[in-house]
Image: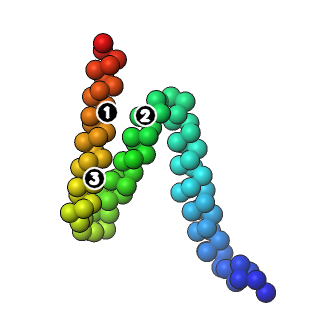
Amino acid sequence: MSRTSTFSQTTWGLILLLGIVFTALPHALFTTALRFLSAKTVGLVSCLQPFYGAVLALLILDEQLTTRTLIGGTIIVATALFETQQSHQKSRA
């Protein structure tokens, strides 16, 4: 008997949830965003995902952020803000 046959329906449901909602759907949204936004903008947003995750973990799960995480998050947000400002200045010129 294979190991997969011992999984419960709940486990299979969670595997499907993980595969569809948390993997396939975000990838589809990412590629759809590339049709409407620049690659730089989409790339910056995807780089901010770990920062969003850390902030949500802090707010929802009461996780503590390390100094390294705070420094990394600050660098990522500062870079995103800088690139956004640069893009706006180039579009005005």
Q: Which mark is residue 63?
A: none
The answer to whether residue 59 shows anywhere in this view is: no
Q: Which mark is residue 83?
A: 1
User: Is 26 situated above or below 89?
Assistant: below
- Circle 1 — which element? helix
Q: Residue at x 29, y 27 (%)?
A: 86
Question: Looking at this view, is 90 or 56 the one in front?
Answer: 90
Disc 2 residue type (three-letter): Lys
Circle 1 packing at 10 Å, graded few (<14), some (14-19), many (20+), is some
Q: Residue at x 52, y 42 (%)?
A: 30
User: Is 59 situated above or below 82?
Assistant: below
Mark 2 and mark 1 residues within 8 Å of each other at the beta carbon? yes
Alpha carbon separation for disc pair 2 and 1: 9 Å
Alpha carbon separation for disc pair 2 and 3: 18 Å
What quarter of the picture does the C terminus occupy? Answer: top left
- Point out the tag, 2 or 3, that comes first from the N-terminus: 2
Q: Which residue is mark 3?
A: 73
